[in-house]
Amino acid sequence: MKKIVFVLSVAAFYAAYGAEWIENSPAANWQESSLTGNGTIGAMVEGRIENESIHLSHCKLYLPEPGDTPPALVNHPRRNPGDYNNRDGFMAACDLKISMRLGGASGYSRRTDFDTGECIVSAKDGKGRRYERRVVALRGANVIAVKTTDESKSDAVFALAGIEPSGRADIAAFSKGIRRIVSEPEYYRCEFRNENPWNKLAGYEVLLTQRRRDAECAEVFVAIEPLLKGQNSNRAAMEARLAAAAEKGYDALLAESAAQQKELMDRVSFELEGPKNAAEIVRNFNSGRYNIISSVGGDHVPNLQGLWAGTWSAPWFASFTVNGNLPCAISFFCRGNTPEFNESLLGWIEARLPEMRDAAKRHFGARGFRAAAQTTVAGVETDSNANYPHVYWHGGAAWLLSRLYDGYRHTLDEMWLKRIYPLMKEIAQYYEDVLVEMPDGTLGFNPSYSPENWPTGKRPTSVNATMDNAIAKQFLGEVVHAAETLGVDAEDRGKWSEMRARLTPYQVSENGFFAEWLAPGQPDNNEHRHASHLYALYDDAPAEILTNAALVAAVKKTIDARMDFNENRSRTMAFGYVQNGLAACKIGDAARAARCLKLLTEKNWLKGGGSCHDWKNCFNTDISGGYPYLISEMLVHSEEVGNGERGTGNGGRYLLRFLPAKSKDWKSGSIKGLLLRGGIVLESLEWQDDDFSAILRFPDGTVKRVNGKAGTQTGIFIDGGV
């Protein structure tokens, strides 16, 4: 094997480019802002030296939406009469305006430091005197902090101000939803006009305090708090918090916050040499991790915009879109060695359980619960109509619980498994009640829906969509294994195993594609952004597909067709590229995986570090999780196996595939700190061309080195040891 040697430029690139995002101009609009967040509050820094706007946000600020009550909710016990019909829109809190003069500014820089969480803007005036502004959402203190250093000693003015409505959607949201605003330089209060049974907010308050350290240094601290129904004000508590922050000072608070931030960022590192855009790939990998780390906290998981906003009306209401966007955003929770983030996902699910259980009963007379494809503050299904019959998509709850079960597979924490198993059992019961026998004797779904596609020439509602089938197949294997691990529900295990075995097999369509629907008479439709039917290959490598040459060929043809359609359309969907790329990784197709990553790298990152839905447009955080996850799957895959298929009794056996889809131009590099299934930590994976060396740390502390060639598979047994 060749000796693995890294060129010094790799480390230099990482230090200079990978650990921060650098721009040489202010943002052209709010979407291109630099980002800082602590999981609860956030700030988007446009970065203008003079007349700056910093957009402030809080993860709970959803504007209650009025409207007619849907017929299905007329007798709902938790509704208010005639007031809820749509998703409540996510909105910004207000702006922090900074006015100053810096004559003859030069040497401008705007950067985000991933290790501290700071957005830093700097320049010099005509006399060479330095100006610097630092903005950070502080962990612990839970305030937005600003520090300015101005050698010219000019006086900056700091003031809170409302966000100017821009466009019809903003104006409509503002006019329909806002009852009253109190706007003062250091206090901003917004009161909502409407309410609904699922949104407890009556408004919110923002408070600012200032402290000048000396003639050159000023510090500003801002608190944001929702107002719940019945509350008059949180101002006294906010004043006390801000006074404590100002007394302690920016530097001391930053040291505490940055220690937490850096510890999270340091858990995983990635270096790369070979492609011309290596530094950009590394930067995007780290920026994606930074964005997700910055927007997870409490029971908050990233909505479509993480937790950031610069308008009154976010695209698609900044909903939690469970049929693709949210699972993509959270896909790196475990692999990125942050399994504790699953606590936030569990809290998010538990908060919506009453409505999700009611939906299963109301729509299908089923036990258990179902997760709405589109929702914001509630667990009810919204935006389901004849063109997008989301209610007939059955996979949402199982997909989310599969993410939580993956938390167990990555940590082997049986206490965690005991906590989530009752929810897993409820979803298995849902499948017991909604699966039906198909004409060929297999089990399937009718009606069904493949987000957000439909057969060519047909209606959106379909029969036995492959995605519904694949999610059920994966989940039923997981719940069987969970019950086996916990030693419970032996009778149910047998029933669920039989259901899983009877699910309709994957198929090749008449035109040679991986079939998106498993009932006859539903033609392929590859002119679409999603690749929902490739779900089985997102996270796993099922033998049913990989041992079938015809199915593998169909997967390749499908990826090509979806990418051919999307590669030349600016209004597309970034997470669809992630889905295609993950499927390519599982079949060991490096070229197709690289094609997907190339487009994501070139088209789906905004100036400032945010990821986007369309090409260079529509701020959206889903691929901030999906991008690093795709890279990690190109480099290593870990699979729980047993009798050739996961979830059928594995005896603690794991299969690791090294460099299964490494791009051919990735000449050398390393990835460190990934958490793999089986509680295995990938201490390091280094490669030179197709030769690699990996160091693995197992749950009992044992360390093992594996050397080999790209595509090497290693079987690992974990049963109280290695």
Image (cartoon, rainbow, N blue to C red):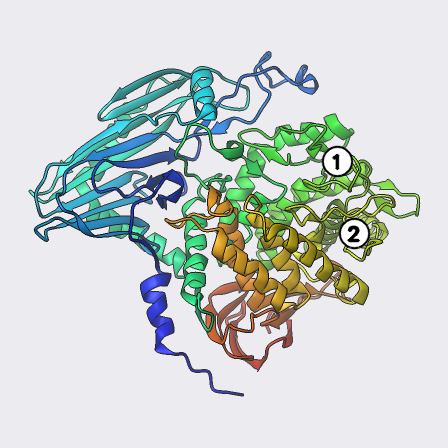
Q: Residue furthest front?
A: 568
What's the amino acid at mark 2? Ala
Residue at the spot of label 2: 515
In the displayed structure image, the side of residue 509 where residue 299 appears, left or right: left
Q: Residue at x 70, y 31 (%)?
A: 387
Task: Choose top left, top right, bottom left or bottom right for residue 320.
Answer: top right
Find numbered disc 2 in the image and state the secondary structure of the residue it sits on: loop
Against 226, residue 552 (above or below) is below
Q: Where is residue 114 shown, x and y percent of the image?
A: 35, 55
Q: Quadrant of the N terminus?
A: bottom right
Residue at the spot of label 1: 460
Q: Nearer the viewer, residue 631 or 52?
A: 52
In the displayed structure image, the side of residue 182 where residue 602 appears, left or right: right
Q: Which mark is residue 703?
A: none
- Marks 2 and 1, Cα distance to the nearest angstrom? 16 Å
Q: Can I make out residue 262 in this image?
A: yes
Against 30, residue 193 (above or below) is above
Q: Residue at x 41, y 54 (%)?
A: 287
Q: Residue at x 47, y 65 (%)?
A: 673
Q: Where is residue 299 shown, x and y percent of the image?
A: 49, 39
Against 115, residue 15 (above or below) is below
In the displayed structure image, the side of residue 275 where residue 518 appears, left or right: right
Q: Nearer the viewer, residue 600 or 82?
A: 600
Q: Where is residue 201 shown, x and y percent of the image?
A: 45, 23
Q: Can I make out residue 676 in this image?
A: no
Number of other residues with Cα within 10 Å of mark 2, as a class: few under 14, some 14 to 19, many 20 or more: many
**Earlier residue among tags 2 and 1:** 1
Q: Residue at x 39, y 57 (%)?
A: 265
Q: Quadrant of the C terminus?
A: bottom right
Q: Nearer the viewer, residue 8 or 437?
A: 8
Number of other residues with Cα within 10 Å of mark 1, as a class: few under 14, some 14 to 19, many 20 or more: many
What's the amino acid at mark 1? Pro
